[in-house]
Image: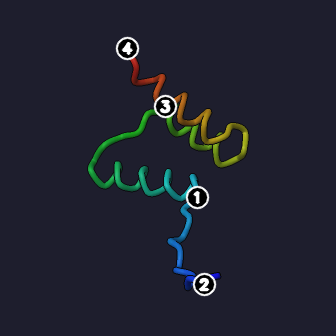
Amino acid sequence: MSVRPTLPTTRQVSATESIEEAVASTRLEGLDLSPEFLADADALESGEIDLEEFRTRTLDRHRP
């Protein structure tokens, strides 16, 4: 049996952290986020919706 050393894994970033970074980046670029996006982000953070529902809502807003 061969043994391989364990490699350090990258830190998992939570959905909340990812959204916070996206919001900050968008604002640094001088852009505004929609009230719907911000409401969904709050709902995700509070556990009212899951990441899949957040993703679906976000994509649905931008589909023709």
Residue 58 - label: 3
In the displayed structure image, the side of residue 16 where residue 49 appears, left or right: right
For the residues labelled 2 and 3, the Cα–Cα distance comes to: 44 Å
- Which comes before the other along the chain, label 2 or label 4? 2
Judge the density around disc 1: few (<14), some (14-19), many (≥20) Cα neighbours within 10 Å: few
**Which of the 4 image quadrants contains residue 48?**
top right
Badge 3 amino acid? Thr
For the residues labelled 1 and 4, the Cα–Cα distance comes to: 30 Å
Q: Position of residue 62 (x, y in %)?
A: 40, 24
Badge 2 amino acid? Val
Q: Nearer the viewer, mark 2 or mark 1?
A: 2
Q: Nearer the viewer, mark 2 or mark 3?
A: 2
Judge the density around disc 4: few (<14), some (14-19), many (≥20) Cα neighbours within 10 Å: few
Judge the density around disc 2: few (<14), some (14-19), many (≥20) Cα neighbours within 10 Å: few
Residue depicted at 27% across the width and 51% down the height? 29
In terms of secondary structure, where does tag 4 sit? loop
- Which comes before the other along the chain, label 3 or label 4? 3
Farthest residue, direction top: 64
Badge 1 amino acid? Ser
User: Considering depth in this image, is 8 or 47 the residue closer to the camera?
Assistant: 8
Q: Could you tell me which quadrant the C terminus lies in?
A: top left
- Which comes before the other along the chain, label 1 or label 4? 1
Q: Nearer the viewer, mark 2 or mark 4?
A: 2
Q: Is residue 26 above or below residue 21?
A: above
In terms of secondary structure, where does tag 1 sit? loop
Mark 4 highlights which residue? Answer: 64
- Which comes before the other along the chain, label 2 or label 3? 2
Mark 1 highlights which residue? Answer: 14
Mark 2 highlights which residue? Answer: 3
